[in-house]
Amino acid sequence: MARSRTAPSQDDLLSRYREIRALSEALAAGLSDADATAQSMPDASPAKWHLAHVGWFFETFVLRDHAAGYEPFDPRYAFLFNSYYEAEGARHPRPARGMLTRPRLDEILAYRAHVDAAVIDALPALPDEARSLVMLGLHHEQQHQELLLTDIQHLFSLNPLEPALFAAQPFTPAAVPGPLHWIEGREGLVEMGDDGKSDFAFDCEGPRHKAVLHPHALAHRLITNGEWIAFIEDGGYRNPAHWLSDGWSWVQAERIEAPLYWTRAEHGWMRFGLDGRRPVNPAEPVTHISLYEADAYASWAGARLPTEAEWESGALNIAPSSGNQLDGAACPRPHAADGSAGLGQMFGDVWEWTGSAFRPHPGFHPAEGAVGEYNGKFMSGQFVLKGGSCATPRGHVRASYRNFFYPHQRWQFTGLRLAKDL
């Protein structure tokens, strides 16, 4: 659920609604019905399901509950496209979403058009509570835009034809970044969490509260593919001394030898991305790594992962709109050395693993009703990631934003920045 905010104006909300809803369909425009139907693993969902689920969210929590006389497009869709809201009743099993050959993609797009027309028609008369739910629905859709891309990438990676969703950008040689240098962070009592200054925040970003920071420093940039290759060549995946116990068991059981989507070729490493199969660029940030891998690399490098509070404190004076976000082919870019002495790549490129568990901030209380299930019930066994990625829609993240995944998951654009004690 969203944190309390002044309801946006009707014109602003309408403009955002049209823009965000159109982007979802643009991202899926190159997909066939088969592309949009298949499901590559239980953690992923078909593109068709993502497109329908976000429509169901608006239809259920805005139109059904706040638009008098609204009739659902198809009452059966509530069972098909509810994700995890227990309060909304039974639903189709998540691992079997890829079995939904019907409705067809064109029927899902018709469903979206029906919902859009109803939301736009209802918007002038919606109370502030419902407008806040529209805002929540738009940020929820932006989350699914990123998931749609990463789920398609995983699906396409399993196809021997190695299809590309986006045309590959011309290769531009980039200098491999120089050695890391360290930026000393704040020390002592600091405030973190939603500060109420942005026009939206998820419930899990607050309340704002105090945290204690001990002397520490953050690396000025992300870890690169070239640095990761050095870790591999030094036996990083074969030395249990660097690994958490659960991580070492995972590496052995899954036979992990490199980041997801990497393959060893005759002339070096290759990687698969949304732009197809390409050589690994040593200057780009490493991505598609698990928390276990990130933690092992940090141990190998004589450092550690930052805490959520350290990362957030370091990002406070950096514009969330900075960095490489979803503006092109969803591919991390090399660090752009601009001569500044500050932290770079804090927003965009890759989600940065922290060493902090995804648990409630002090004073957190979930909202009442079904929307209270949005974040709170997932605060168990996950770790916080910060900063957004090259697949995150621009304008979606802020310093207090808390992404979260289980430590073994790595199909998202996940990477790392090192920290150390002083």
Image: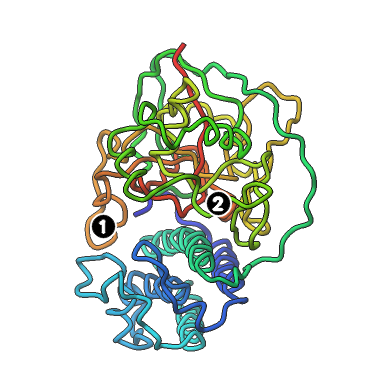
Disc 1 designates what residue? Answer: 373
Residue 72 position (above or below residue 396): below
Residue 151 image offset from top left, x and y in percent? 47, 64
First reached walking from the N terminus: tag 2 or tag 1 = 2
Disc 2 designates what residue? Answer: 262
Mark 2 residue element: strand
Mark 1 residue element: helix
Give the residue displayed 58% in from the left and 19% down from the top: 182
Determine the CA span between mark 2 and mark 1: 36 Å
Which amino acid, mark 2? Trp
Residue 316 position (above or below residue 42): above
Give the residue displayed 58% in from the left and 41% down from the top: 347
Residue 219 image offset from top left, x and y in percent? 56, 25
Residue 175 position (above or below residue 15): above
Residue 340 position (above or below residue 26): above
Decide which of 216, 317 is in the foreground and name it.
216
Decide which of 201, 302 is in the foreground and name it.
302
Quadrant where the N terminus sits is bottom left
